[in-house]
Image (cartoon, helix red, strand yellow):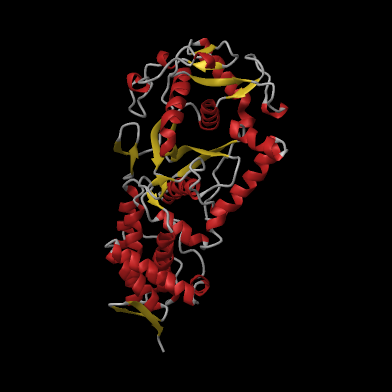
């Protein structure tokens, strides 16, 4: 096949073909589930939703595994704060996650393993590592991984051991022989609730975060699989440690391709709960319809940074309206995509080049322009079918268009302010887009030396 994917491990675009012909096995690190998901989490899950959609559109069978971390220090702390059990908290948050990402059209993975269901497999893996001399029991009761005994450590992140230890001092109180070592099994603490502890040959305790994904991925997909994905922030140390654990135990590559999506940024900082600069999916969906949010995320390349703002979401909605307007003006035929069609061929070429959604979306707009000109039901059907590969344009055009048809004074003034800001930033394309979108809704802008006014078309 012609698909090329950027492989973080090789730092290059590489031709992709699954190890088992016709069947892709993909593991993506999912949520640590102690609170509502924010737009940064949505971006990660959306990125790999598009990946699996395109793989399937390319005629491949996909086994897509996205895990849930349901035991963690933050989960324990939150459950104690709320006076409920860990299971009550995680069940509640998992249900909320499914509701929120389902609204965005993110399809369920083939399997969604919970870490607490795979503790025996984690203990077995830790036992293998101890037997190979890669793990040791520390004085504080933890079991740690000995990083320096794994020759390939740092190959994913490109970090050398000398770089990693710069400025360090040995963490004696953590029971580590070396500050680079990381925990595989955490010894139980007296103050922790009973449902945060498991009995094992290593004593009562719970698994470390990294060992969870090694056990779940290998248990569900085998010791080597095709794609391992996640956010760019997981590249180090989480994915680096997964490689050390899994390959240290099996002697085989964990994944052939390592794929990482970019951050969502707010004021040039990564959106995260620790920084407090996040917007939950639920909050955003109170202001914007789900397909607009999906389009806002999908039209950016999955590896690029995505800048969150109301202006960009407003622009995404207006852009999506232009696509739906094309479908609203003509009968839409049901079509099976003919990939030799010039538009389909360009769309495929874009997606086959590392899931190039910006170029693919540009093809949709070109096709929409042709639908507007020709009023062809077949081309309208092709527009809908190609957009469906991205999870877009599957709703009723009239319903979408009418949902935002009424502009009040505040909305118009907000759009005028956004246009002024765009002009101030010399983003004249966005400024012109806002003017055209308002005109399409019957609002005429008039610029003067004193500012911009508006009037409704008669």
Q: How many marks?
A: 0
Give the quarter of the image for residue 161. top left
Considering only vertical position in the picture, is 414 above or below 174? below
Residue 114 visible in the current orientation: yes
Give the quarter of the image for residue 194. top right
**Front residue (pair 349, 7):** 7
- Point 45% across, 17% down: residue: 179
Considering only vertical position in the picture, is 343 above or below 260? below
Q: Where is residue 247 drawn, in percent x and y? A: 44, 21
**Front residue (pair 270, 50):** 270
The C terminus, quarter of image: bottom left
Q: Where is residue 322 drawn, in percent x and y? A: 39, 70
* Residue extending farthest bottom: 458
The N terminus, quarter of image: top left
Q: Where is residue 443 drawn, in percent x and y? A: 40, 80
Going by the image, does 385 lie left or right of 78?
left
**Front residue (pair 57, 195):** 195
Q: Where is residue 238 drawn, in percent x and y? A: 46, 30
- Point 37% across, 69% down: residue: 379
Going by the image, does 140 lie left or right of 455?
right
**Front residue (pair 271, 134):** 271
Residue 380 visible in the current orientation: no
Going by the image, does 134 lie left or right of 33?
left
- Point 36% across, 45% down: residue: 303
Give the quarter of the image for residue 224. top left
* Residue extending farthest front: 450
């Amino acid at each position: 096949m012609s698909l090329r994917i950027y492989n973080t491990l090789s730092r290059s675009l590489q031709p992709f073909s699954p190890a088992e012909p016709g069947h892709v096995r993909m593991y993506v690190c999912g949520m640590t589930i102690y609170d509502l998901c924010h737009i940064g989490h949505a971006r990660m899950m959306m990125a790999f939703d598009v990946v699996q959609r395109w793989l399937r559109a390319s005629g491949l069978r996909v086994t897509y595994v996205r895990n849930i971390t349901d035991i963690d220090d933050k989960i324990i702390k939150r459950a104690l704060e709320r006076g409920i059990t860990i299971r009550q908290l995680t069940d509640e948050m998992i249900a909320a996650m499914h509701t929120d990402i389902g609204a965005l059209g993110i399809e369920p993975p083939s399997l969604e393993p919970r870490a607490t269901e795979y503790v025996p497999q984690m203990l077995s893996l830790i036992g293998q590592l101890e037997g190979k001399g890669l793990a040791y029991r520390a004085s504080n009761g933890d079991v740690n991984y000995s990083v320096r005994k794994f020759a390939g450590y740092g190959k994913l992140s490109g970090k050398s051991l000398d770089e990693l230890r710069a400025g360090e001092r040995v963490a004696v109180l953590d029971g580590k022989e070396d500050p680079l070592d990381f925990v595989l099994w955490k010894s139980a603490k007296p103050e922790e609730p009973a449902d945060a502890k498991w009995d094992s040959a290593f004593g009562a305790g719970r698994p470390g975060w990294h060992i969870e994904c090694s056990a779940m991925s290998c248990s569900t997909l085998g010791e080597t699989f095709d794609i391992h994905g996640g956010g760019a922030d997981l590249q180090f140390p989480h994915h680096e440690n997964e490689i050390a654990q899994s390959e240290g135990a099996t002697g085989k590559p964990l994944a052939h391709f390592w794929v990482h999506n970019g951050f969502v940024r707010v004021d040039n900082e990564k959106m995260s709960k620790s920084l407090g600069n996040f917007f939950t999916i639920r909050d955003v969906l109170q202001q914007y319809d789900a397909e607009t949010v999906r389009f806002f995320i999908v039209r950016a390349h999955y590896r690029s940074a995505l800048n969150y703002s109301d202006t960009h979401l407003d622009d995404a909605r207006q852009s999506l309206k232009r696509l739906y307007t094309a479908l609203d003006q003509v009968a839409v035929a049901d079509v099976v995509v003919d990939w030799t069609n010039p538009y389909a061929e360009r769309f495929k070429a874009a997606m086959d080049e590392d899931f190039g959604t910006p170029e693919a979306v540009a093809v949709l707009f070109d096709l929409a322009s042709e639908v507007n000109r020709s009023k062809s039901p077949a081309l309208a059907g092709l527009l809908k079918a190609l957009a469906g590969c991205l999870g877009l344009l599957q709703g009723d055009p009239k319903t979408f268009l009418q949902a935002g048809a009424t502009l009040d004074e505040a909305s118009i003034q907000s759009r005028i302010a956004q246009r002024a800001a765009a002009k101030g930033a010399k983003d004249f394309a966005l400024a012109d887009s806002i003017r055209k979108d308002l005109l399409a809704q019957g609002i005429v802008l008039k610029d003067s030396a004193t500012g911009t006014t508006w009037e409704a078309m008669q």
